[in-house]
Amino acid sequence: KSVSVDRQENIMRFIDNNKIIRGTYDTKAMLMGGGDAVRLKAEVDIDGRELTRRYLETLPLDTLLSEVNGIKSEEQMVHFMLKHGDQLVNTLGAEINQIEDSIKKEFPDIKHIDIEIN
């Protein structure tokens, strides 16, 4: 059984209030197993610039600049991009976990959350 449209819209607005989320689409909230527990599915569009900002906040920028200035070959550039690309994905995972935790805190009946990145 689906949760009311008003409630789904409230959940969607809550998700959209996260700066890293550019938009939320195809939100579905269903009651699980005849009880009060809710399963939430939402597709989100991530703001890549905001994600990158959050990743950069974890780095000493002077060290990053030195790394960039030290790139002298394509091989070094590839190594740099692979290293930071991997860390950017880790940052995205941490951000999604934080969003899921905040949803569960705001809506305690939501027990299962499936956020898909568009």
Image: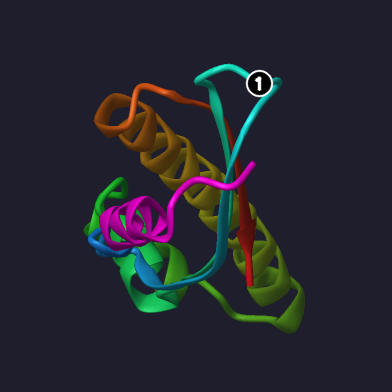
* Above or below for 20 versus 111: below
* Above or below for 31 versus 35: below
Compared across the picture, whether 5 is left or right of 102 comes to right
**The one of 72 and 92 positioned closer to us in this rendering:** 92
**The one of 13 and 81 positioned closer to us in this rendering:** 13
**Element carrying mark 1:** loop
Magenta segment boundaries in residue numbering: 1-15
Quarter the N terminus occupies: top right
The residue at the point 64 percent across, 53 percent down is 86
Outermost residue on the top side: it is 35
Q: Position of residue 92 (x, y in %)?
A: 51, 52
The residue at the point 41 percent across, 55 percent down is 8
* Above or below for 21 versus 89: below
Q: Position of residue 62 (x, y in %)?
A: 23, 59
The residue at the point 66 percent across, 27 percent down is 32
**The one of 103 and 56 positioned closer to us in this rendering:** 103
Compared across the picture, whether 3 is left or right of 11 comes to right
Q: Amino acid at mark 1?
A: Gly
Compared across the picture, whether 52 is left or right of 14 comes to right
Q: Position of residue 29 (x, y in %)?
A: 55, 47
Quarter the C terminus occupies: bottom right
Q: Main secondary structure of the magenta part?
A: helix
Name the residue tied to disc 1. Answer: 34
